[in-house]
Image: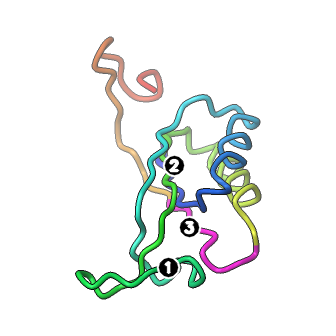
Amino acid sequence: MKEIKAYVRPERAGAVIQALEDVGINGMTVIDVTALAEWADPRRTRFSLTHAKRYSRTVKLELICPAGRVNTITEAIRVAGHTGNPGDGKIFIADIDDAISIRTGERGQAAI
Protein backbone atom coordinates (compact mmCIF):
# COMPACT_ATOMS: atom_id res chain seq x y z
CA MET A 1 0.00 0.00 0.00
CA LYS A 2 1.09 3.56 -0.66
CA GLU A 3 0.14 6.93 0.77
CA ILE A 4 -0.13 9.81 -1.64
CA LYS A 5 -0.04 13.38 -0.38
CA ALA A 6 -0.60 16.10 -2.94
CA TYR A 7 -0.45 19.86 -2.42
CA VAL A 8 -2.40 21.72 -5.11
CA ARG A 9 -3.64 25.21 -5.84
CA PRO A 10 -7.04 25.87 -4.21
CA GLU A 11 -8.52 26.84 -7.58
CA ARG A 12 -7.40 23.47 -9.07
CA ALA A 13 -8.59 21.31 -6.14
CA GLY A 14 -12.04 20.65 -7.64
CA ALA A 15 -10.53 19.50 -10.94
CA VAL A 16 -8.03 17.28 -9.12
CA ILE A 17 -10.75 15.68 -6.97
CA GLN A 18 -12.86 15.06 -10.08
CA ALA A 19 -9.87 13.50 -11.87
CA LEU A 20 -9.32 11.20 -8.89
CA GLU A 21 -12.96 10.18 -8.90
CA ASP A 22 -12.69 9.54 -12.65
CA VAL A 23 -9.87 7.00 -12.02
CA GLY A 24 -11.88 5.25 -9.31
CA ILE A 25 -10.75 6.95 -6.11
CA ASN A 26 -13.80 7.30 -3.90
CA GLY A 27 -12.17 8.27 -0.62
CA MET A 28 -9.57 10.86 0.33
CA THR A 29 -8.89 13.52 2.91
CA VAL A 30 -9.02 17.13 1.71
CA ILE A 31 -7.49 19.77 3.97
CA ASP A 32 -7.07 23.54 3.53
CA VAL A 33 -3.53 24.35 4.65
CA THR A 34 -0.98 27.13 4.57
CA ALA A 35 2.27 26.10 2.90
CA LEU A 36 5.62 27.49 3.96
CA ALA A 37 7.87 26.59 1.07
CA GLU A 38 10.15 27.82 -1.64
CA TRP A 39 7.80 26.30 -4.23
CA ALA A 40 4.90 28.54 -3.23
CA ASP A 41 3.54 30.73 -6.02
CA PRO A 42 5.54 33.97 -5.80
CA ARG A 43 2.54 35.97 -7.07
CA ARG A 44 0.31 34.73 -4.23
CA THR A 45 2.74 34.60 -1.30
CA ARG A 46 3.00 36.83 1.69
CA PHE A 47 5.84 37.32 4.12
CA SER A 48 5.39 36.14 7.69
CA LEU A 49 7.13 38.20 10.34
CA THR A 50 6.98 35.23 12.70
CA HIS A 51 8.51 32.71 10.32
CA ALA A 52 10.32 35.04 7.92
CA LYS A 53 9.32 32.73 5.07
CA ARG A 54 6.82 32.88 2.27
CA TYR A 55 3.48 31.22 2.82
CA SER A 56 0.58 30.48 0.55
CA ARG A 57 -2.86 28.95 0.95
CA THR A 58 -2.99 25.49 -0.62
CA VAL A 59 -5.08 22.31 -0.53
CA LYS A 60 -3.63 19.04 0.73
CA LEU A 61 -5.09 15.77 -0.53
CA GLU A 62 -4.25 12.51 1.24
CA LEU A 63 -5.18 9.00 0.15
CA ILE A 64 -4.07 5.39 0.54
CA CYS A 65 -3.99 3.09 -2.49
CA PRO A 66 -2.57 -0.21 -3.74
CA ALA A 67 1.00 0.17 -4.99
CA GLY A 68 -0.09 -0.80 -8.50
CA ARG A 69 -2.36 2.26 -8.78
CA VAL A 70 0.23 4.91 -7.89
CA ASN A 71 1.18 5.92 -11.45
CA THR A 72 -2.45 6.28 -12.59
CA ILE A 73 -3.38 8.32 -9.52
CA THR A 74 -0.35 10.60 -9.52
CA GLU A 75 -0.70 11.30 -13.24
CA ALA A 76 -4.38 12.23 -12.71
CA ILE A 77 -3.33 14.66 -9.97
CA ARG A 78 -0.47 16.09 -12.03
CA VAL A 79 -2.53 16.68 -15.16
CA ALA A 80 -5.55 18.15 -13.35
CA GLY A 81 -3.43 20.34 -11.07
CA HIS A 82 -1.12 21.69 -13.76
CA THR A 83 -1.25 25.35 -14.78
CA GLY A 84 2.37 25.70 -15.85
CA ASN A 85 3.05 28.42 -13.30
CA PRO A 86 5.26 28.34 -10.22
CA GLY A 87 3.33 27.07 -7.21
CA ASP A 88 1.37 24.32 -8.99
CA GLY A 89 2.23 22.02 -6.08
CA LYS A 90 3.92 18.77 -5.20
CA ILE A 91 3.06 15.07 -4.89
CA PHE A 92 4.68 12.84 -2.27
CA ILE A 93 4.47 9.04 -2.11
CA ALA A 94 5.24 6.91 0.96
CA ASP A 95 5.01 3.25 1.91
CA ILE A 96 2.27 2.15 4.30
CA ASP A 97 3.11 -0.95 6.32
CA ASP A 98 -0.41 -1.67 7.56
CA ALA A 99 -3.89 -0.27 7.99
CA ILE A 100 -6.47 -1.21 10.62
CA SER A 101 -10.20 -0.53 10.56
CA ILE A 102 -11.25 0.65 14.01
CA ARG A 103 -14.83 -0.52 13.42
CA THR A 104 -14.21 -4.01 12.00
CA GLY A 105 -10.64 -4.84 13.00
CA GLU A 106 -9.80 -5.66 9.36
CA ARG A 107 -6.19 -5.13 8.37
CA GLY A 108 -4.27 -4.24 5.23
CA GLN A 109 -6.07 -3.45 1.99
CA ALA A 110 -9.39 -4.68 3.45
CA ALA A 111 -9.20 -1.91 6.07
CA ILE A 112 -9.20 0.79 3.43
Q: Is residue 110 above or below residue 18?
A: above
Q: Are marks 2 and 1 in contact (CB under 8 Å)?
A: no
x, y percentage for residue 78? 70, 60
Q: Are marks 2 and 3 in contact (CB under 8 Å)?
A: no
Q: Nearer the viewer, residue 88 or 47?
A: 47
Q: Residues within 10 Å of mark 2 (few under 14, many from 20)?
A: many
Q: Secondary structure at mark 2?
A: strand
Q: Residues within 10 Å of mark 3 (few under 14, many from 20)?
A: some
The alpha-carbon separation of the residues under discs 2 and 3 comes to: 11 Å
Range of the magenta residues? 84-92
Left or right of residue 25: residue 96: left
x, y percentage for residue 65? 54, 39
Q: Kindly identify which numbered label has been placed on residue 61.
A: 2
x, y percentage for residue 12? 68, 56
Q: Nearer the viewer, residue 112 or 55?
A: 55
**Residue 79: quadrant of the picture:** bottom right
Tag 2: amino acid? Leu
Tag 1: amino acid? Thr
The mark lying in front, picked from 2 and 1, is: 1
Q: Which residue is mark 1?
A: 45
The residue at the point 47 percent across, 71 percent down is: 56
Q: Which residue is mark 3?
A: 90
Whichever of labels 1 and 3 marks the residue nearer the N terminus, that label is 1
Left or right of residue 58: residue 103: left
x, y percentage for residue 20? 68, 41
The mark lying in front, picked from 1 and 3, is: 1
Q: Are marks 1 and 3 in contact (CB under 8 Å)?
A: no
The residue at the point 60 percent across, 82 percent down is: 43
Q: Secondary structure at mark 1?
A: loop
